[in-house]
Image (tube, rainbow, N blue to C red):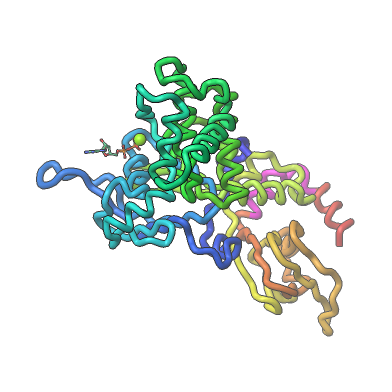
Amino acid sequence: MAEVLASGSAVRFDPMLRKRIAAGQTPAIAANRLQHHYGAGELRKQVLFDNSLEIYPGEIIIMTGPSGSGKTTLLTLIGTLRRVQEGELNVLDRPLHAATQREILDLRRHIGFIFQAHNLFDSLTALQNVRMALELVDPRGSRAEHNRRAKEMLEALGLGNRVHHKPKQLSGGQKQRVAIARGLVHQPRLVLADEPTAALDEASGRTVVELLRRMAKEKQVTIVIVTHDNRILDVADRIVNLVDGRIRSDVLVQEAAIVSQMLSKCELFKHLTPRSLAEMADHLQCETYAAGETVIREGEPGDKFYLIRQGRVSVRRGPEQREVAVLGEGDFFGEIALLEDKPRNASVVTLEPTVLYSLSKPQFQKAMAEQASFETEIRTSLFDRH
Ligand SMILES: Nc1ncnc2c1ncn2[C@@H]1O[C@H](COP(=O)(O)OP(=O)(O)O)[C@@H](O)[C@H]1O
Ligand SMILES: [Mg+2]
């Protein structure tokens, strides 16, 4: 997956597809035209511009971007540590732009913060530092129960033998893990982390990431991580890139990986370099169809190539439009008219709700030109297929 990102292959986050995938879910975080500035008068400086974003329960978002681009500001707005000035921001079903102080305090109990400055209490042990987070959200809970949960969380982070140490007896990485334990011990529904792994060695970083991944997948916890740590990019479902206060790209990593893999399995593209495949993936458009819709019609000119992402289609031919094939996920169609500059030689009708990725004729031909020397071979393989 890292390779996919490095080569710049990424299907742009597509809200329509996303809605299908997340059908029925309301976002855990929904920002609408969110803006933010610091200072006033001459000193007024706007740092977030018109940002809209939806993050769903169970998603892990990695936020990247140059220093000063507004990442921490956005994170602290989501975490209710700053007041929303302009635009709307809904977090765990509460409108922060219109919330009372009481609602905000209540919401904070469901949020876990892991921030760079770990702010541990020097006079307290690791266990006591972690336990404090539980006492805050659950003041009536039993001490024994709090101890048990705090200890369990420290163990999960590899600090089972450090529970009674005070911060100054711990290394930087160990302190950071205590801070992480404190941010997660109360089982928040939303975790906001600012460079959580920066101070950690590779193995500890992995432990932390694995813990976050399990929380997201098993308990539908929503996780937003600001990081420059390339080693943990693979945990992300989506990568949001913030530049100069604006979301530049929002990439559904999983989807990008799936589509690149589908393309690389197409016989038609077997001679394309990973780079050309990546470029092609970048130009795909997502189209959704209900059952029974005609995608292409026999006899009409061909203008697109299609890859089936989800669903099934029927290929029909001749005066009676007899079904000659049924295609499903990972199959493709529409290439012949583009390769041979002929009208469509069949119609394609959806058999169920279907999601297709399409590539325009010019993009398709560009990709084909790049493997022109293999054209003969490709025609042969097409001949075999149809
Ligand atoms: N409390 C503040 N008062 C004034 N300016 C701030 C404050 N916090 C951040 N800024 C400015 O806002 C911009 C965005 O900062 P920040 O959100 O911390 O970016 P990042 O986390 O991406 O480095 C920067 O220019 C920074 O100097
Ligand atoms: Mg920052």
Q: Main secondary structure of the magenta part?
A: helix
Q: Residue at x 42, y 58 (%)?
A: 30
Residue lying at the far top in this picture: please name it: 169
The residue segment tinted magenta is: 364-375
Q: Is residue 43 above or below residue 350?
A: above
Residue lying farthest to the right in this orientation: 384
Quarter of the image holding residue 66? top left
Residue lying furthest bottom: 320
Q: Is residue 117 left or right of residue 163?
A: left
Ligand 2 falls in quadrant: top left
Q: Is residue 242 visible?
A: yes
Asked if residue 373 lies in the magenta stretch, the reply is yes
Residue 324 to residue 75: above or below: below
Across and down, in percent, residue 181 comes to 49, 34
Image position of 242 with respect to 286: above or below: above
**Residue at x 53% of width, y 46% of height:** 60
For the point 44% across and 43% down, the residue is 112
Across the whole image, how many numbered discs are drawn on residues? Answer: 0
Q: Residue furthest left?
A: 41
Residue 93 lies left or right of residue 361; in this view the side is left
- Residue 226 visible? The answer is no
Residue in the foreground of this view, choosing between 295 and 164:
164
x and y, in percent, of residue 237 in the image = 57, 47
Q: Residue at x 69, y 50 (%)?
A: 368
Q: Nearer the viewer, residue 377 or 220?
A: 220
Q: Is residue 346 magenta?
A: no
Residue 364 picture quarter = bottom right
Q: Is residue 138 left or right of residue 84?
A: right
Q: Position of residue 363 (x, y in %)?
A: 61, 54
